[in-house]
């Protein structure tokens, strides 16, 4: 899994993560890796109220990751041409911006 270490992923500012993909398409690997990272037990413990929903479709649809933050803002990533590292980077930067404690810890 090509992503930053799991310990740095904090879901404190996240309300819901919805991941949808067609498993028979060739461009879903990064989406599945992202789902595995945010769905791991170490990450889920950072916010037990965060919903992580995966929708598996069989309609050749584009893989999409939809993140809803506690302040109502949404981050929608169309993941067909993104790597797991790129998605994690965008996700982490938003999470850090929304959580002052994480921002302070990152500066140290």
Image (cartoon, helix red, strand yellow):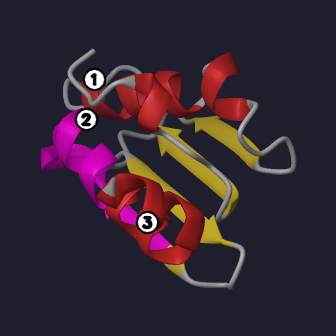
Rendered-image quadrant of the N terminus: top left
Q: Is residue 70 left or right of residue 29?
A: right
Separation (CA) of disc 3 from disc 1: 30 Å
Observer-nearest of 87 and 108: 108
What residue appears at the point 45 percent right and 64 percent down from the top-left corner? 104
- The answer to which of marks 3 and 1 sits earlier in the sequence is 1
The mark closer to the camera, 2 or 1, is: 2
Name above or below for residue 25 compared with residue 94.
above
Please identify the quarter of the rendering in which residue 70 is found.
Answer: bottom right
**Location of mark 1 (residue):** 29
What residue appears at the point 55 percent right and 36 percent down from the top-left corner? 57
Q: Is residue 99 visible?
A: no
Verify CB contact (< 8 Å) between mark 2 and mark 1: yes
SS type, badge 3: helix
**Location of mark 2 (residue):** 84
SS type, badge 1: helix
Separation (CA) of disc 2 from disc 1: 8 Å
Please say whether residue 87 is one of the residues in the magenta stretch: yes
Observer-nearest of 108 and 41: 108
Q: Which residues are magenta?
A: 75-90
């Amino acid at each position: 899994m090509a992503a930053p270490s799991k310990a740095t992923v904090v879901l404190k500012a996240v309300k819901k993560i919805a991941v949808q993909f067609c498993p028979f398409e060739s461009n879903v690997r990064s989406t599945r890796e992202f789902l595995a990272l945010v769905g791991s037990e170490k990450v889920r413990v950072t916010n037990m109220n965060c919903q992580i929903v995966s929708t598996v479709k069989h309609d050749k649809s584009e893989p999409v990751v939809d993140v809803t933050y506690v302040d109502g803002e949404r981050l929608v990533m169309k993941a067909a041409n993104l790597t797991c590292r790129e998605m994690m980077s965008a996700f982490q930067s938003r999470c850090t911006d929304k959580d002052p404690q994480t921002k302070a810890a990152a500066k140290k």
